[in-house]
């Protein structure tokens, strides 16, 4: 018995122990979920499943009214509702366990690594994440690609290399095309890594009297990914193939105008002075929704000038309004903070099963509030102020304020379903705070490359 225990302990300490345990957990979780949970598909009207039937070579697949990655995943799942539910469940399990392994590799103590491996995957069973696997919308895909992006980010920060840079570039690309707002989060974080890599590459070139170093290769890979992502994001969002919209911003912006601009005379006047058509027919839409009367505001000729203004000038005028009134913009977003960081969307997913572990997780995870996650990030950064900041801490410390920025713009750029559109924010804060805590207290010294001293091998 002692010999067996010793062998198990030795296996756990090896590089294969963590992935094997994670795989066993994944198999057990899938067996439980597939065998005992109600996996009836919850339909929606956003057309992801329908668009998944288009050819990968067609423009309709990429230039639809929603980003294409969810439809791509549904195509891989067979373009059926039942296949989508099972596919989303399996993909979610693989993604979150991949992040578990990536984070666990940086934990020095075997006992703590075991606790992490058994506890952290519970996030994929939290109904605010798990419940979306049955819904035919983009949320499950977004959560899964976010977990894979975090795993690639952690792996790259622990040991930068060309292969890991490529994986981070791919994860960044696919995550950005799950929701139009996510480039506001992904782009700056990867951009910060680019600045660090550029500095390292230049310093390595000076120290070793050579023009090229491995850091330049990583820099080139990540830069190319950002450029391609930005170009395709702009192209697909500004040339939508749809009978009613030509750009993706039209529908949400019309909702913002008729819900937040038209009802307020002083705001309405500000927009009218900058070219927004305001006449009696438009004023009748106050406090309604853009989808009302069978999308009449996008169909009838009498709204033509208004539609043209929204498409060509509306977005920039609205951004100008937010910039000109920062106090009002921040105050209104702060008042909606419960919607921006919602943790219970049973309206879409149904109630969590009244059994273990769902009830416990539904109580525990909301205790990690946005304020607590922000305080953790600040405390860890200040703690390391006189020390060497690891690349992992830098990346996730940057993620925390960017989540708030992302939530701010999600709230202001769409007046409809803010809770669902900003759903990733709360989970992102929880993961970022957890990753920084692990990095501060459990990481191997070798996995903490110094930015200030350039101790990581370029």
Image: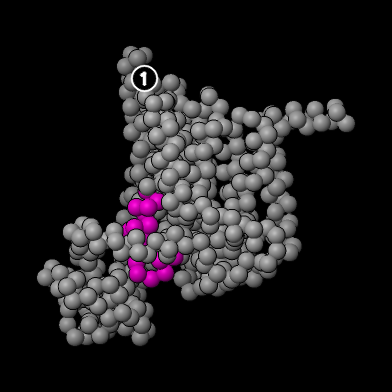
Question: Residue 409 versus residue 162: which sits nearer the camera?
Answer: 409
Question: Residue 357 versus residue 87: which sits nearer the camera?
Answer: 357
Residue 353, percent across and down?
66, 66
Q: Would you place residue 405 above or below residue 451 in this image? A: below
- Residue ranking furthest to the left: 273
Residue 250 in view here: no
Location of residue 323 by image quarter: bottom left
The residue pinned by badge 1 equals 204
Q: Would you place residue 174 above or below residue 313 in this image? A: above
Residue 324, percent across and down?
18, 59
Q: Is residue 9 left or right of residue 326?
A: right
Q: Is residue 259 magenta?
A: no
Location of residue 21 by image quarter: top right
Give the residue drawn at x 68%, y 67%: 354
- Mark 1 Cα-neighbour bin, 10 Å: few <14, some 14–19, many ≥20: many
Location of residue 289 by image quarter: bottom left
Residue 321, percent across and down?
20, 62
Residue 371 in view here: yes
Give the residue drawn at x 44%, y 53%: 370
Q: Would you place residue 221 above or below residue 132 in this image? A: above
- Quarter of the image for the N terminus: give it: top right
Q: Is residue 447 left or right of residue 377?
A: right
Q: Is residue 282 left or right of residue 374?
A: left
Q: Main secondary structure of the magenta part?
A: helix
Q: How is the image coloured?
A: one colour
Give the residue drawn at x 40%, y 40%: 378
Q: Which residues are magenta?
A: 402-419
Q: Is residue 412 magenta?
A: yes
Q: Would you place residue 62 above or below residue 26 in this image? A: below
Give the total number of marks visible in the rendering.
1
Residue 229, percent across and down?
37, 48
Q: Report helix, strand or loop for mark 1.
A: helix
């Amino acid at each position: 018995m002692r010999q067996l225990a010793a062998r198990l302990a030795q296996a756990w300490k090896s590089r294969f122990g963590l992935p094997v345990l994670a795989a066993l957990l994944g198999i057990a979780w899938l067996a439980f979920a597939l065998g005992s949970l109600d996996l009836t598909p919850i339909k929606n009207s956003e057309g992801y499943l329908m668009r998944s039937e288009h050819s990968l070579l067609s423009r309709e697949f990429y230039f639809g009214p929603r980003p294409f990655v969810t439809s791509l995943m549904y195509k891989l799942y067979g373009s059926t509702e039942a296949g989508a539910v099972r596919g989303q469940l399996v993909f979610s399990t693989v993604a979150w366990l991949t992040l578990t392994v990536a984070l666990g590799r940086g934990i020095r103590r075997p006992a703590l690594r075991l606790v992490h491996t058994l506890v952290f995957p519970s996030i994929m069973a939290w109904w605010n994440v798990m419940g979306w696997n049955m819904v035919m919308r983009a949320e499950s895909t977004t959560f899964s690609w976010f977990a894979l992006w975090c795993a690639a980010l952690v792996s790259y920060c622990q040991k930068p290399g060309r292969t890991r840079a490529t994986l981070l570039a791919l994860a960044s690309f696919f995550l950005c095309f799950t929701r139009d707002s996510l480039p506001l989060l992904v782009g700056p974080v990867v951009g910060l890594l680019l600045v660090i890599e550029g500095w390292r590459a230049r310093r390595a070139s000076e120290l070793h009297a050579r023009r090229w170093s491995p850091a330049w290769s990583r820099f080139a890979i990540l830069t190319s990914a950002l450029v391609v992502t930005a170009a395709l994001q702009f192209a697909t969002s500004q040339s939508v193939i749809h009978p009613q919209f030509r750009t993706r911003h039209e529908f949400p912006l019309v909702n913002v105008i008729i819900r937040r601009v038209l009802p307020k005379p002083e705001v309405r006047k500000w927009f009218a002075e900058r070219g927004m058509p305001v006449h009696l027919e438009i004023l009748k839409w106050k406090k309604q929704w853009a989808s009302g009367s069978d999308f009449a505001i996008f169909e009838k000729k009498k709204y033509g000038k208004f539609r043209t203004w929204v498409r060509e000038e509306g977005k920039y005028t609205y951004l100008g309004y937010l910039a000109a009134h920062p106090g009002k913009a921040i105050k209104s977003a702060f008042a909606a903070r419960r919607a921006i960081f919602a943790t219970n969307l049973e309206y879409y997913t149904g109630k969590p099963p009244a059994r273990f572990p769902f009830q416990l997780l539904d109580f525990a995870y909301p205790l990690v509030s946005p304020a607590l996650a922000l305080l953790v990030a600040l405390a860890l950064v200040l703690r390391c102020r006189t020390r060497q900041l690891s690349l992992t801490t830098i990346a996730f410390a940057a993620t925390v304020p960017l989540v708030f920025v992302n939530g701010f713009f999600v709230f202001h750029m769409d007046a409809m379903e803010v809770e669902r559109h900003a759903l990733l924010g709360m989970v992102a804060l929880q993961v970022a705070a957890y990753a920084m805590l692990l990095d501060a207290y459990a990481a191997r010294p070798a996995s903490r490359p110094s930015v200030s001293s350039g101790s990581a091998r370029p």
